[in-house]
Image (cartoon, rainbow, N blue to C red):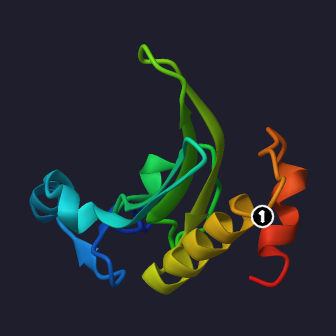
Amino acid sequence: MIQLPRFRAPQFFDKDGSPLDAVEWAIRYEDKEYCTIARDEVDGWWINTMWTGSPGTFPFLTFNDTGPYPIFGTGAVLDRGQDDYMVLELWVYATIDAAQQGHRRIVEWMRRPGLVPLLCSTALAEVFEHV
């Protein structure tokens, strides 16, 4: 019996979701300006939204071979000094539009008066209830 190779989805994508080879991806990945989608600071928390170009960046996710693939991510990180960081959460997106919208919603949520960010995903569910 002949075994055909299993279809393998592309591993690297540009910001528009078009496939890249490893060299093209590496060149873009080294360009921090290209990678940065948005960055804001809210009460000592840095909210960074970045293009990673590879769904392999998020190994804790499962997705099918037909896409769309998570190639953007937003992290909320508190710098507590002396190389001590606390990560609030990580959100992932398949398109640049979703990444920009998600970033804005997270920043708006964290800027709410009297809000102390909680280390609990369920507390952030309201941010994305309509995405």
Horizontal and vertical percent for residue 107?
A: 62, 65
Describe the element under mark 1 as helix, strand or loop. Answer: loop
In the visual, does 42 lie left or right of 7? right
Instruction: Name which quarter of the figure residue 31 lies in.
Output: bottom left
Identify residue type, mark 1: Arg
Residue most toward the front?
113
In the visual, does 6 lie left or right of 22? right
Q: Against 34, is 19 above or below?
A: below
Horizontal and vertical percent for residue 13?
A: 31, 71
Q: Residue at x 85, y 63 (%)?
A: 125
Instruction: Name which quarter of the figure residue 60 lies in.
Output: top right
Q: Residue at x 80, y 60 (%)?
A: 113
Please tell me which residue lies in front, 68 or 124. 124
In this figure, which residue is indicated by the disc labeled 1?
112
Horizontal and vertical percent for residue 127?
A: 79, 70
Q: Against 54, is 34 above or below?
A: below
